[in-house]
Image (cartoon, rainbow, N blue to C red):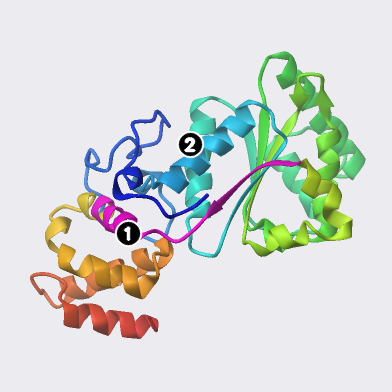
Amino acid sequence: TSAIVDPEAAKPAESDLGIPGVDSPDVPAAAPISDPFTMTPNPALFYPSKQHREAVEGLWNGIRTRKGFLLLSGESGMGKTMVLECLMDRLKQEKIEYGFILNSRLAVADLFEMLRADFGLETASLTKTSVLIALNNLLLKFAGEGKTVALLVDDAHQLSNEVLEEIELMSNLETRQGKLLQVVFAARPEFELRLGEVALRGLRSRVMRRFRLSPLTEEETTEFIRVRLRQKQDGVTLVPESLFGEIHRRTGGVPRMITALCGAAIERCEETQAAAVDQELLEQVASEFGI
């Protein structure tokens, strides 16, 4: 998905994602958030740029229509985990069962142990066979009720080929209506290169939809900062818009870096009891970050 959009396109459309703060950045949260520049992904702080909104909607639709394997890629700090958090909120609202693999440095045995725990599978043992039988029975039960099940994998680029091959084999769990388990991979771009390896070409052919996150444009960076500032009481006055262009230039439009720089600048501003962040303070904080 291209990040190059016009200013109007950068503004969120009126979509019903069911996520707090998604419908419009002009509508403030019901209550101020003490630290709107927290590094912890919080869907209440989600800025729905065109590409991020399309990723959430596209992944949701892929799960809903049982596409099987879906891929969200982007360099570190582009907002992949935030997209997954928003997606999980949607899955909860729609009462769709899902598992979430956050620690992707897994051995094969760890994978099946996590599947057993996440889906509450009752098995006589932790063997792969026992877990797969229980998982298949669960998936068939939900399919019979017209429900689907998803597995979300963050930092998928860290998974070993052996674990990825095991996940690929789970796509064999299907009925005539489609795949029983929907898998969403969130990974850095090198994961797509790995899918070109001989051992993983089968998995590559099964990835039905792909979404890629790119740096925000300057217009999107401006809206991103505005959305966060509106969540903080009197926050709008702390970072003047005259500095937004400089923040974009120094961070390259990477959401994580924008968040870190603005958060640190506001914290320094409050510590020194300055009226607002100015050019000198911003340059000082940016220098400490090495940007």
Task: Single out the residue that lies furthest toward the top.
Answer: 145
**Helix, strand or loop status at disc 2:** helix
Q: What residue is at 24 percent from the left and 54 percent from the top?
A: 226
For marks 2 and 1 on the same chain, the one whose residue lies earlier in the sequence: 2
**Label 2: which residue?**
89
Q: Which residues are magenta?
A: 207-227
Estimate the x, y position of residue 223 in percent, counting from the top left. Answer: 28, 53
Q: Residues within 10 Å of mark 2 (few under 14, many from 20)?
A: some
Q: What residue is at 38 percent from the left and 30 percent from the top?
A: 15
Q: What residue is at 70 percent from the left and 32 percent from the top?
A: 67
Q: Is residue 80 visible?
A: yes
Query: Which sits in the foreground, 269 or 23?
Result: 23
Q: What residue is at 44 percent from the left and 61 percent from the top?
A: 215
Q: Is residue 54 left or right of residue 181?
A: left
Q: Quadrant of residue 137?
A: top right
Distance, label 2 to label 1, CA atoms, is: 24 Å
Q: Is residue 5 above or below residue 284?
A: above
Q: Is residue 3 left or right of residue 182?
A: left
Q: Quadrant of residue 236?
A: bottom left
* Amino acid at dot 1: Thr
Q: Is residue 226 left or right of residue 124?
A: left
Query: Which mark, residue 83?
Result: none
Q: Is residue 167 visible?
A: no
Estimate the x, y position of residue 114 in percent, counting from the top left. Answer: 73, 47
* Amino acid at dot 2: Asp
